[in-house]
Image (cartoon, rainbow, N blue to C red):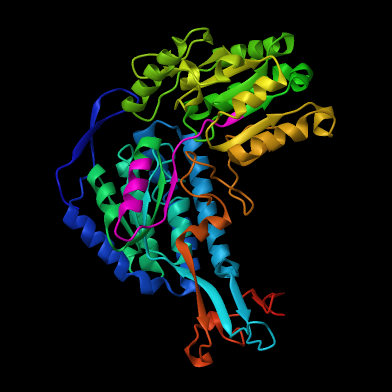
Amino acid sequence: MAAAPVWSVDPRTGNPREQVAVESTAEEIDQAVRAAHDALPALADRSVRALLLRTAADLLDEAREYVIEAADAETALGPTRLTGELARTTAQLRAFAGVVDEGAFLDIHVDHEDSTRTPPWPDLRRYKIPLGVVAVYAASNFPLAFSVPGGDTASALAAGCPVVVKAHPDHPGTSELCASVLRRAAQRVGLPEDVVILVHGFEAGIELVGHPLVAAAGFTGSVRGGRALFDAAAARPAPIPFHGELGSLNPVVVTEAAAEERAEQLGAGLAGSMTLGAGQFCTKPGFVLAPAGDAGDRLLKSLTAAVSETEPGVMLDHRMRSAFVDGVRERAELPDVQAPITPGAGGAHTVSAGFLSVPARLLAAEGPHDLLLEECFGPVTVVARYESAAEITAVLGRLPGNLTATLHLSSLEADGDGRGAELLAELTPLAGRVLVGGWPTGVAVAPAQHHGGPYPATTSTSTSVGATAIERWLRPVTYQTTPEALLPPELREDNPLDLPRRVDGRRETPGS
């Protein structure tokens, strides 16, 4: 995409810098989508798709030094954090290669003709096929794992869908580098490099979601931006699935018994989680219900001590830094809100971590304190001090949808003595992942993982992390009374590809 370079601000220094990003034109977006669409048939072979994913992981590992250097220069996230993120990125590429090899994601069902049923059954054979071109909108806070080579791209390619990625403006150079690695991987395994195409610019995002050959979209970003694209996807003449991760408060409930048992440990753990990565994780615990009284005071004392030792951090860009500083100032100015450690501007280009404290009763009904129930991106959390179980229930009943919800119980409560089960039942409707103990900022790339939740956490019920993320880019199709010679190999009677399937309701495994 040839155009003049654009400029941005270095998050470390505040100095302007020239970037490789260009604003893709509407014509170039059309060309990119059409080229990706033309590459769709080449991804039909599952073995080649698996090889593509593994080769991409290998080439990213080989380019590790350059990828981390580029990402650190643009995001200031640091080599240690980015080394771990790259390892996660290549691991999920390899994990999806395994998913493709196994073939269970095809969800094959064969029901033979049965004239004894009322009404009679014809011969029916069902599996899942790729939707088509997927538009991926890269995230700001994960320049690798949720961007060009990230989970949306990996799962879409695994499903057999070409990808057009809209780069995030905070790391265009990293995006270009990673896209070139993925395209080189495609060439190496004999696929057209246009199975992955990169575009840049705000208008590119709008053009992508409206293009008639784009079949689905995956987004990670703000509520405002994600909702606008979601609405555009739904308003198309032919609406498409829009899988958006938008925003999350990630509430935490600490029982009084848990605080009495280990207040100091809980305060230190909360501090580590809410300041991790300068508070720029989508799973940051941004709202905590903690008891009033002595045990809660001990927890806050521990939290205060731990947060006080946290060095000022650099946020991803100055726009986010300004939003954080303004957001915490507005929250701190609310009546009866205290700031034991005041969050805000740490220096000319950094932010200081902190937390706010408020009586939970002020959040039990609609009012000016509702601002505290909205996500504030950055190193801050809100601790709401409750005085009764009724206050916990009232506040939880007012929370929006979340990616995670965490419950900290005492050892006796965890064994079933007390309100543990009741609180777990109250938290479950609020989030896609519910933790009992621990902190939510680690998201394991595992088959049982669910990274999603009720709106506004996400715009669909799907996950963007874990093996089942592939399901977003597939649709089922059933063949009825179709001659064997015309059936796709996946649905033929003799199962020539040796795939897992259900036949007349009974599970068959490969080799059986």
The C terminus sits in image quarter: bottom right
* Residue 255 placement (x, y as % from top left): 73, 23
Q: Residue furthest front?
A: 118
Q: Is residue 18 left or right of residue 491?
A: left
Q: Is residue 5 left or right of residue 217?
A: left
* Residue 252 placement (x, y as % from top left): 63, 28
Q: Specify whether residue 442 is in view.
A: no
Query: In the picture, residue 42 is in which quadrant?
Result: bottom left
Q: Which residues are magenta?
A: 227-251
Q: Is residue 260 left or right of residue 200?
A: right
Q: Residue at x 65, y 20 (%)?
A: 391
Residue nearest the observer in this picture, 170 or 403: 403
Q: Residue at x 52, y 10 (%)?
A: 337
Numbered disc total: 0
Q: Residue at x 21, y 61 (%)?
A: 31
Does the stretch in magenta take in 367?
no
Q: Is 80 rendered above or below residue 501? A: above
* Residue 359 placement (x, y as % from top left): 59, 12
Query: In the picture, residue 41 is in which quadrant?
Result: bottom left
Residue nearest the observer in this picture, 147 or 67: 147
* Residue 262 placement (x, y as % from top left): 75, 20
Q: Specify whether residue 22 is in view.
A: yes
Q: Is 50 rendered above or below residue 219? A: below
Q: Residue at x 51, y 91 (%)?
A: 483
Does the stretch in magenta take in 236?
yes
